[in-house]
Structure formats: C-alpha cells, structure tokens
C-alpha cells in the first residue's frame, strides 16, 4: 500500500507501483494518454514527454499528493469518451 505524503524515489516499491499503474493506462485504449510537448530539448530531443514520465515527474515534484487519489482522478480525466 502506498503511504500518503511521500516522495517516490526511483527504484522504490511505491515508484514501481505508480509507474506500473500509469503504464497500464497507456496500454489501455480506454484512456487518452498521448505524449505532450516539453521545451527541454536536452532530455527530450523530439520535444515530447511520455504520459508516464510526465506524471511521475509531477508526483515527485509534489510529494504531499496522495498517489491513490491522483491516479484515480487521472483515470477519470483521461478516460476516452465513446
């Protein structure tokens, strides 16, 4: 289970869980998970950041967020309408 109010250091169980959940969303056609533009050309030479990287960076930058709620809200926001 994920603890509230914690950062998700690379390699930790929490980071692996969050990354896995985001990757499942990318693989599921029910979600709109397109890459988005990022102006950091050194790290992203094509100018696109993946859905997973974008949200992992956001969670790491905001360690007080509850990852369970963030992923639940993200599922609602990105669900493709049919």
Image (tube, grey):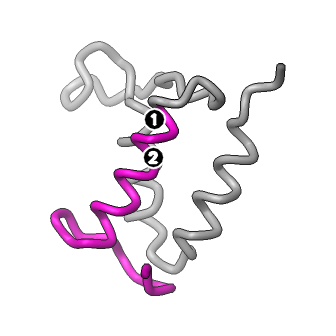
Up the image or down, 13 lies above or below 26; here it is below
| Number of marks present in the image shown | 2
Q: Residue at x 36, y 42 (%)?
A: 53
Q: Tell me where residue 65 appears, x and y as whole percent.
A: 55, 74
Q: Tell me where residue 66 appears, x and y as whole percent.
A: 57, 75
Q: Residue at x 73, y 27 (%)?
A: 80
Q: Residues in magenta?
A: 1-26
In the picture as drawn, the residue positioned furthest to the right comes out as 82
Residue topped by disc 2: 22
Mark 1 or 2, which is nearer the eye?
2
In the picture as drawn, the residue positioned furthest to the top comes out as 46
Tell me if 13 is positioned left or right of 81 in this view: left
Q: Tell me where residue 9 appears, x and y as whole percent.
A: 24, 70
Estimate how packed mark 2 is, as few (under 14), some (14 to 19) or many (20 or more) residues with alpha carbons within 10 Å: many
Magenta region includes residue 63: no
Q: Secondary structure at mark 2?
A: helix
Residue topped by disc 1: 51
């Amino acid at each position: 289970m994920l603890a509230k109010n914690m950062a998700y250091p690379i390699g930790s169980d929490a980071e692996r869980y969050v990354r896995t959940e985001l990757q499942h969303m990318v693989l599921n056609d029910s979600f709109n998970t397109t890459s988005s533009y990022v102006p950091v050309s050194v790290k992203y030479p094509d100018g696109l950041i993946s859905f997973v990287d974008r949200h992992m960076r956001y969670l790491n930058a905001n360690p007080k967020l509850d990852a369970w709620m963030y992923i639940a809200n993200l599922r609602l926001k990105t669900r493709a309408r049919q």
